[in-house]
Amino acid sequence: MTPEKGKLIEVLKEVVYFPKGDNIINLKMVDDIELGENLIRFRLLFEKVDDEKNQFLIDTATQMLKNAFGDIEIDIVAASQENSLSKVKHIIGIASGKGGVGKSTVAVNLAIGLALQGMKVGLLDADIYGPSIPVLFGNEETRPLGYDRDGKSYMIPIEKYGVKMLSIGHLVDKEMPLIWRGPMASNALSQLLLDTDWGELDFLVVDMPPGTGDIQLCLAQNFTMSGSVIVTTPQRVALADVRRAANMFRHEGVNVPILGLVENMAYFTPSDMPEKKYYIFGKNTGADFAKELDMPLLAQIPIDENISEANDKGTPFSFNGFSPVAAAFEKLAKKIVEMF
Ligand code: ADP
């Protein structure tokens, strides 16, 4: 008789892994299930595969399966939970309540700024409906290379300005509209994260889609993010957007620490009058938002008339020598490094 999968899952949901306080199904520790004539075989994934305590869990699961299915062969193989993010120390999400506030500009310049601080940095463009990283990096036409290992295909991220990056824009045709919705989009994103050989990284900066929809939630819930940065512009009306983004990260079951707020386009300094600051959209707004929403104000990035041109040319500001914008991003990168 071949055991039934539904019943198998039911039984395995009773098997609790005490160090994590949950059952092995919820903890996603069961993989590669194979059911045959009087046979149950699967892999049990452990963080430390050679831990001698693992055998206790294997014995418990075996006994419970024998109790439920009778005298059949049970073959549970301990395997490593390792995936392509295992050597990534910190995933940092860059978010905003709405589009057009400079979230991608901040993600790119922060990633380069961290690399300039000597960190090993990756950058994932998770804005899969409007990927802009390939344009900002000036490598729209580049395609990632790939390789196969243990029957699985991996992509090698593209390297530029000391940053390993990947965007859905590097994989699909520019002209092809991205009409994915819901689960399909979340799946594409999980693949970008997990099927890419990121290697050893200190920081993986993730440029999240604007707003607070399902994709943002999928990211925050399925991947262990060390922190998030919320980007805003200084208009008073933006407060509601920042609050929504903050509430998403603070939501029970999401719980991603908010590292702080970045106020982009905070003021304008004409290049021929560097001592002058014009607060076009409002003064102290970023500081007020940060106080009101109980988070630090990490940076105030000035408006720079050259930033759009730099963005369009694919030569991000942080990499462009000294300017007030580059200096602001350098300060931001230093602050983030200090936080970890
Ligand atoms: P988002 O990712 O939030 O949609 P982008 O980073 O794509 O925003 O920026 C939106 C537009 O604003 C781009 O044209 C970008 O060049 C411009 N921009 C962003 N930050 C600044 C700035 N500090 N000064 C001037 N222009 C900026």
Image (spheres, rainbow, N blue to C red):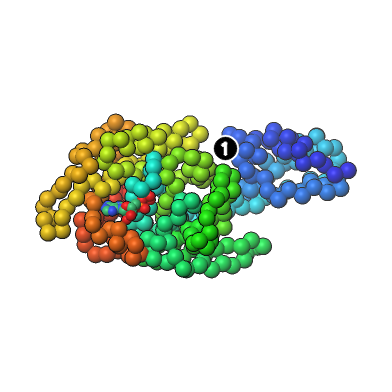
Q: Secondary structure at mark 1?
A: helix
Residue 128 visible: yes
Q: Quadrant of residue 324?
A: bottom left
- Residue sticking out furthest to the right: 1
> Residue 127: percent from the left, percent from the top?
46, 51
Horizontally, residue 224 falls left or right of residue 48, namely left
Horizontally, residue 147 falls left or right of residue 231, namely right
Q: How many marks?
A: 1
Is residue 58 or residue 151 the one in the foreground? 151
Is residue 298 or residue 65 the one in the foreground? 298
Q: Classify mark 1 as within 8 Å of ligand 1 or not, answering yes or no.
A: no
Is residue 128 or residue 318 the one in the foreground? 128
At x 44%, y 65%, the residue is 140
> Residue 210: percent from the left, percent from the top?
42, 45
Horizontally, residue 133 falls left or right of residue 324, namely right
At x 74%, y 35%, the residue is 11
Residue identified by numbered label 1: 20
Q: Quadrant of the N terminus?
A: top right
Residue 190 visible: no
> Residue 73: percent from the left, percent from the top?
82, 46
Mark 1: few, some, or many residues within 10 Å (few <14, many ≥20)?
few
At x 86%, y 40%, the residue is 71
Q: Is residue 145 above or below residue 236?
A: below
Q: Quadrant of residue 317?
A: bottom left
Horizontally, residue 41 falls left or right of residue 144, namely right
At x 39%, y 42%, the residue is 98
> Residue 120: percent from the left, percent from the top?
40, 60
Amino acid identity at mark 1: Lys
